[in-house]
Image: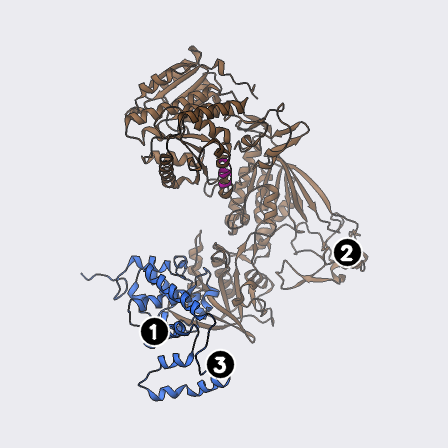
Chain colours: A brown, B blue
Amino acid sequence: MNSGLPMADTAQIGVFICHCGGNISNTVDVTEVRDEVAKIDGVRVATTYEYVCSSPGQDLIKEAIKNEGVNRVVVASCSPRMHLETFRRAVEEAGLNPYQLEMANIREQCSWIHNDRLQATEKAADLVRGAVERARHLEPLEPEKMRVNPGVLVVGAGIAGITAALEIADKGYRVHLVDRSPSVGGHMAQLSKTFPTMDCSSCILAPKMVQVAHHPNIKIITLAEPISMSGSPGNYTVTFRKLPRYVDEAKCTACGECVKYCPSRVDSEFEAGLSQRKAIYIPFAQAVPNKYAIDGEHCLYLNKGVCRVCERFCRGKAINFDQKEETLELNVGSIILSTGYEQIDPKIYGNYSYGLHPDIVTNLQYERLMIQGIHRPSDGKPPKKVAFITCVGSRCSGDVGQEYCCKIGCMNAIKEAVLLDKSIPGANPWIFYTDVRAHGKGYEEFYADARNVHNVRFIRGRVAEVMPNGEKITVRAEDTLLGMHVEEEFDLVVLQAALVSPRGLKDIAQIFNVPIGHDGFLLERHHKLRPVDTSRDGIYACGCVLGPKDVRETTLEAMATASKVATFVGKGEILSSPEVARVDSTKCDGCGVCIAICPTKAIEKTDRGVRVNPISCIGCGLCVPQCPTGALDLNHCTEAQLLAQIRGVSSGGTAPKIIAFLERETPYASVDLAGQTRLSYAPNIEIIPVPSVGRIGVKHLLQAFASGADGVALVEGDDGCLQGNALREYVAKLKKAVAPYGIGPSRIMSTSTTIPQYEKLLNFFEMFNKNVTKAGKIPDEMRQKLGKTIEEVST
Amino acid sequence: MKELKVIENSVPDPSFLETVQKFPGGEKITDCIQCGVCGGSCPARAWMDYSPMQVIHMIRHGLKDKVLSTSTIWICASCYACTTRCPRGIDIPILMSNLKRLAMEEKVPAKIRTKPVFHRAFMEVIQKYGRMYEPELFLKVADKRDLLGLFHNASLGFRLMRKGKVGFKPPRVSESSEFLAVLRSRNNNRRDNE
């Protein structure tokens, strides 16, 4: 990948300083900066130009590379977030490795925010000097290439998983569709109709279930749960625990003879506990695979060693009690998580009296009642007057229930009320709602239809109490629009229970190493722009595992993940950034400190020490300062490069000098944003981007103080590798470590930021600047002493 | 042209919301989603002119005069039915008692005339003995002009005395001086803060 040897002796540096059409040159004396850097050893070309990013500007760089022997390029202009790719392409076209380019941001972080020409020029010179010193140590890097396994794993076979699997299989990739239950189908198979079109749910789902069963590219694996994952994006190995079915799928004809004789009864999950099933069962008539399964927890033979009646009556001799739990290993390139949702048990809220009267049911139970032919569970009579209660456990503060809106409750209640009106003449459906949320195609019209055509009464008010009252049920609430109490008797009460993340999702998240959000569902990588990506490359998620949603939106997401997966595995190979950690195996003693620190588990133990997986490594650099033997380093932010840049930036400028190490994504962008809004901060604050604050160790702090800094700020992004307490603890440790060298704790300060909070960051700068000014300049003798200490430490 | 008023007789006071937010019980009122479960659960709602939900909404609009003159704040019996069901965890009874205190401090006439008298008398008795002494409270609250009314509750009083629930002598609290000092310092603090 690279020689690992610094080529400081041969570096021929070309520096190109941009006027940016006055944007820079009106505030910064660019010729002075040029003259200043031209003096630095190794600078072969130093020039200024009106627009370096223009074609003639880029030609200047290319000519210098081709004709002047320049082999390191420094461009001092706008933010690298603006034109890094432009200049990388330019140097590459001239035959130089793109990683041998360095940029100094003298527009957003200098000319746009300072008015004093002298100070701005001094600061620009510091920043360019830092870039030149760093450029001296730049090494050529090549991205890693890796073959991608074209297989795809889909975990969870509800409508999301089924849709995604079909889409991907149709594109020609092999799909393993895994579910922990004995059949695919998920929650959608339980529903009566779907809003707002009133399509029969199983009529639109069943054909898709049959399709996945017969698709040549799809393999269905039921009764299986993932237990571990290893590997890296493009080459994951997932291990499953496959529970025994105790029925030979090849021999079972689904004749149903066994069920007649099975003596063990349990509540049916599919019927939401409204009826019972046997221990040998098929979840529902359209189940795929359409094969019986024995519920090991409730089978008499498996628990008490007696019975085996099913075996006797099975004509196909399909029963096999010798089946054992197996582990299954799958090698895939990409993974989709679609494990769906669960509903809360309304028993946790006493005021709904759920469980105290058979005619108080959840929405899922009502769906089953609709399919069975609408009746009251208590006496089987058709209910006339039904209360539908929304927001049961939703829209609460965190300690009371779920904070979010369940998103389907309103439309579901309306659908169920309309269905009641359609199926029972003279029915009287009431909906108690907090707010009707009818967003989505055709939803508001459906709501209007419920009022106009279907005789549904809407009461705006959260229900205070549901009370069993003999055969009937009394519901009490306030109609908040009238300020009047409502106390009515109903035949049936339906609770729209809150949707929550499915049980076991935490384990799934841990196995696949993807984050869970505040709401308990999986966290997408970007709420708007990458809504189905998880934080791990090659692992996607769709449907309710990301948060509550309806069937239409779930299908949309499933198709989106299919497209993402096809793009990911379709490339055949992946390039990954070469800005990753590397190990010097001659120094590594295999202590394993780095393995514990690595946030992406990219470091593995080998017999000769450790190995960094370049595909999994995100290049945060947390491991580097913690390595006790100095065996680890980070490409493109090596110790040599970072120390040189710190030396360059720290020398010169106005006292008290502050070096701010900013995580290069969020905080760096925040400061750029401050620059774009022309919000000023003290010119003695100079910025060095780092992959994470955790890349900065004691050595770097000492170097900064030795070379001229009087204060060091550390700013991490709120999605960075060091979060909250971890950041505070890390910085506290750094402060403690530098204290013996006479560096007071007030000289080091840390914070974290999100992009819109650039004002917070500027306040932080102001406060820190005050602290450091108060602490005063570090005396020169102390700096010399520090310098000597660093030399001693490094030798 | 006639100016459109938000609610009659009320001038919005934006600082009112901030004042209430500093009270115990007022911290979360911007979190109210106006679902109405408080009014639906309240056993005394029929006697209130506004639902607690509406009082909270008025606070958010800064309608100070209107809020402090509602009967709702005086009728609240602190039974906590609302708070046990409030999805946002708002402590409505505490909010109501703080609004009562504010109304008394601001000398807003209460819709229920006897209520402030009762509350003041209650605290006076507590501050005197460190515990409740019902006969004295009764004498403080009772309408002296209505002699018949004085005997209206007499039989209840005798029954309570017979069971030892109410004594002839004021109750004694051990370390009462310390307890009263706590009460006094609390009052002083409040005065200092305001």
Q: Are marks 2 and 3 in contact (CB under 8 Å)?
A: no
Residue B47 rendering spot, x and y as whole percentages: 38, 75
Q: Nearer the viewer, mark 1 or mark 3?
A: 3
The verdict on a common chain for dots 1 and 3 is yes
- The residue under label 2 is A302
Residue A728 rendering spot, x and y as whole percentages: 48, 41
Q: Nearer the viewer, residue B154 or B40?
A: B154
- The residue under label 3 is B165
Label 2: which secondary element: helix
Give the chain letter at badge 1: B
Q: Quadrant of residue A101?
A: top left
The verdict on a common chain for dots 1 and 2 is no
Magenta stretch, main secondary structure, is helix
For disc 2, the neighbor class at 10 Å (few under 14, some 14 to 19, many from 20) is: some
- Indicate whether residue A731 is drawn in magenta: yes
Q: Which residues are magenta?
A: A728-734
Give the chain letter at badge 3: B
The quadrant of the rendering that contains the C terminus of chain A is: top right
